[in-house]
Amino acid sequence: MDELLKWREEFPILQNTVYMISNSLGAMPRRAYDRLRDYGDAWATRGVRAWAEGWWEMPMGLGDEIGRLINAGPGEVSTQPNVTIAQDIAASCLDFRGPRNKIVIVDMEFPSLQYLYHAQERLGARVQVVRSRDGISVPMDELLEAIDETTALVPISHVLFRSAYIVDARAVAERARAVGAMVLLDTYQSTGTVPVDVKALGVDFAVGGTLKWLCGGPGVAFLYVRPDRAAELAPRLTGWMAHRRPFGFETGPQDYRDDGWRFLHGTPSIPALYAAESGVKIIGQVGVDKVRAKSVRQTQRLVELALEHGFRTTAPTQPERRGGTVAIEVPHGYEVSRVLLEREILVDYRPKAGIRVSPHFYTRDEELEVTVREIQKILQTRAYEKYLGAAAKVT
């Protein structure tokens, strides 16, 4: 018996859908309704007093909850509005005008982050892109070779968004440390479904968000900064919350706080923080190790089902290198995904990957079979044809 299925009743959407899209948007916990009501009540009844009665501490308080999931200490994780901003804060700590000005990235990174790092070229950065050989994995030999004494930063995803390939982050961090470079690990596709230990991995920064596997909804990301690094870093992307005396409203240069608050900036989105709490706490209660064990079993079954039906997957074949998603490549993949959505089987489609199917701890085994069987039916009946010619849109 699958003990994790007892959590299904916590997620209303599971009652009428086959929810296979936690890699994109985790299912909403029922108790998030209550927390958003708490926010509304606080605003309605306490007004401006709510800031002093809990709102002001929320960005770091939720950061501590997330920190427990990635083995970060208290005050080492700040919450941010999204991962692009979180990465930009880290990048803004660096000076690219000297000889150590190289940023090493791989071409499998999420496009938003590639745009961000190429934009650093205006500040003097040199961006070296390491290209995947198979569209699934990272060529570690080339990546490690690219990290040299001129490298300032290596932003790398723990799990690649297209293929769910798990990168050897420890090897990247060891190489970077040997040449004096820093590593920023993007854990968006791992935190909540693949164990993450920022201390053991030895990374300088880590980012992620609550949108996906943490079932916390949009509007909350996080930034971990290694504590022995933090005090020497002064982000250019800053604001009043990072100031030592924010309510002094002092003019002039920033006087940074000494703790994790120094990586905050403007006023936080309080409703998003309320909404995110429940999912983070549920994952903590379930335990990421249990989530991972189930994920390995179910993604392996998805690969087997896809092959049984004659479909190709663009996911790693080795379970230890595969995150929580299996991308299934079929003809007219985008159009097929639209029909699946109509039929209450929630998936998404990505170019150069296929239909991404992502079970989570609340997924029933039979839902794997339903999903792959329905893909086959849609292809056999050509039900996808009504979407032919429509522009592909992400979901």
Image (cartoon, rainbow, N blue to C red):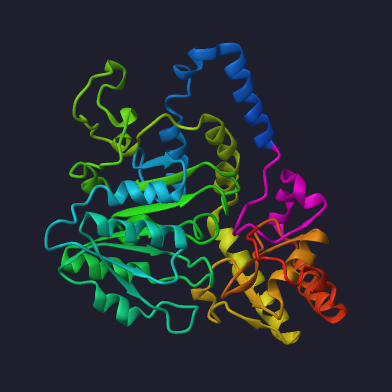
Q: Residue furthest front?
A: 389
Relative placement, left or right, of 223 versus 297 is left
User: In which quadrant of the rendered image does the C terminus lie?
Assistant: bottom right
Residue 184: x percent and y percent? Answer: 33, 58
The answer to whether any part of residue 188 appears in the image is yes
Please name the residue shown 25% across and 68% down the image.
174
Q: Please tell me whether residue 171 belongs to the stretch shown in magenta.
A: no
Relative placement, left or right, of 164 versus 246 is right
Q: Quadrant of residue 332?
A: bottom right
Relative placement, left or right, of 220 versus 306 is left
Q: Residue furthest right?
A: 381
Tell me if residue 2 comes above or below residue 130 in the rendering: above
Tell me if residue 50 comes above or below residue 105 in the rendering: above
Q: Quadrant of residue 116?
A: bottom left
Q: Please tell me whether residue 12 belongs to the stretch shown in magenta.
A: yes
Nearer-the-camera pick, 393 or 274: 393
Magenta stretch in the rendered image: 1-30
The answer to whether any part of residue 186 appears in the image is no
Please name the residue shown 43% across and 24% down the image.
56
Residue 375: x percent and y percent? Answer: 78, 74
Please name the residue shown 44% across and 16% down the image.
52
Residue 78: x percent and y percent? Answer: 39, 40
Tell me if residue 44 comes above or below residue 364 in the rendering: above
Residue 112: x percent and y percent? Answer: 45, 58
Please name the residue shown 67% across and 65% down the image.
391
